[in-house]
């Protein structure tokens, strides 16, 4: 889907105009234009593939999360508790990232710059910095590394591809996705380190409760 987007916009607040906190175009607007231009010069099949990954790729991280839990519960309760913490960690990373978005108020590049994008530009007020997709993918990838190095490695590759795809389709600046990756990875590393330390206690707490089937194969 191709969308043509108008030039710079500002948000009116009462009788005055609210100045945006971050002008992303001044940071790496030229790099963004280069990537979007490359996308339009690339074969249609490649653009379709990248667009599909950008839109639906997060499903892969959900699948890897379920696979990690399924394997972990065959190991022991501690491994299962660690795996069960992955989706909670992703939700926490998304929450932190969303708060940063609300504080920064950076317009999407497809609303600031006159460009044609592969993906429709998000509505005004759907802020650009940091990228939620990148944060979610990075959080899932780092959290999965605590569960399985193999699954985590696949997730890391997927997270990098997700970040790149969001610039390719035109909805984020490069610095948006880099910041999203950093936020997701930092939140996941901190929370999963804490989970690893407390997993034994949580396992003992849940053993014998209705949740115990989630912990290990009978």
Image (cartoon, grey):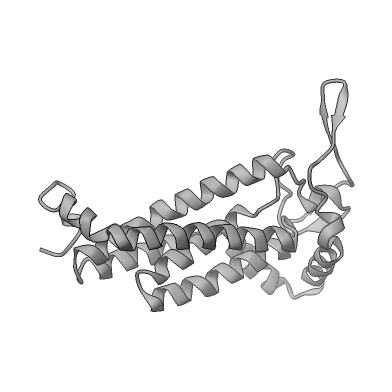
Residue 64 appears at what percent x and percent y?
40, 67
Q: How many labels does the image show?
A: 0
Q: Which residue is drawn at 71% across and 55% down?
A: 119
Q: In which quarter of the image is the N terminus?
A: bottom right
- Please identify the quarter of the rendering in which residue 28 is found: bottom right
Task: Pinpoint residue 140: horizontal percent, then vertical percent.
Answer: 46, 62
Residue 71 position in % (x across, y down):
26, 70
Residue at left offset 66%, top offset 68%: 164
Residue nearest the viewer, comparing 22 with 215: 22
Going 51% across and 52% down the picture, which residue do you hit? 93
Query: Does residue 132 show up?
Result: yes
Q: Quadrant of the C terminus?
A: bottom left
Choose between 130 and 44: the one closer to the eye.
130
Q: Which quadrant would residue 86 be assigned to in this image?
A: bottom left
Q: In this view, does 124 lie above or below 201?
A: above
Between 167 and 38, the residue placed more toward the observer is 167
Q: Is residue 111 left or right of residue 166?
A: right
Q: In which quarter of the image is residue 117?
A: bottom right
Say left or right for 166 vs 53. Answer: right
199 with respect to 149 (left or right): left
């Amino acid at each position: 889907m191709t969308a043509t987007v108008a030039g710079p916009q500002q948000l009116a607040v009462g009788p005055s105009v609210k100045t945006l906190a971050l002008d992303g175009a001044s940071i790496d607007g030229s790099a963004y234009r280069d990537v979007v231009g490359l996308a339009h010069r690339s074969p249609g099949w490649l653009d379709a593939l990248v667009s599909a990954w950008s839109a639906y790729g997060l499903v892969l991280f959900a699948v890897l999360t379920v696979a990690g839990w399924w394997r972990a519960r065959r190991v022991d309760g501690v491994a299962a508790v660690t795996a069960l913490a992955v989706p909670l960690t992703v939700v926490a990373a998304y929450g932190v990232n969303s708060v940063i978005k609300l504080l920064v108020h950076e317009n999407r590049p497809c609303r600031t710059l006159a460009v044609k994008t592969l993906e429709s530009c998000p509505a005004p007020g759907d802020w650009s910095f940091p990228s939620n997709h990148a944060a979610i993918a990075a959080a899932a990838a780092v959290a999965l590394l605590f569960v399985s190095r193999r699954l985590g490695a696949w997730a890391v590759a997927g997270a990098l591809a997700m970040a790149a795809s969001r610039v390719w389709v035109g909805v984020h600046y490069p610095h948006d996705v880099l910041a999203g990756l950093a936020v997701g990875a930092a939140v996941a590393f901190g929370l999963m380190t804490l989970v690893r330390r407390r997993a034994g206690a949580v396992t003992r707490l849940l053993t014998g409760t209705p949740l115990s089937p989630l912990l290990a194969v009978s």
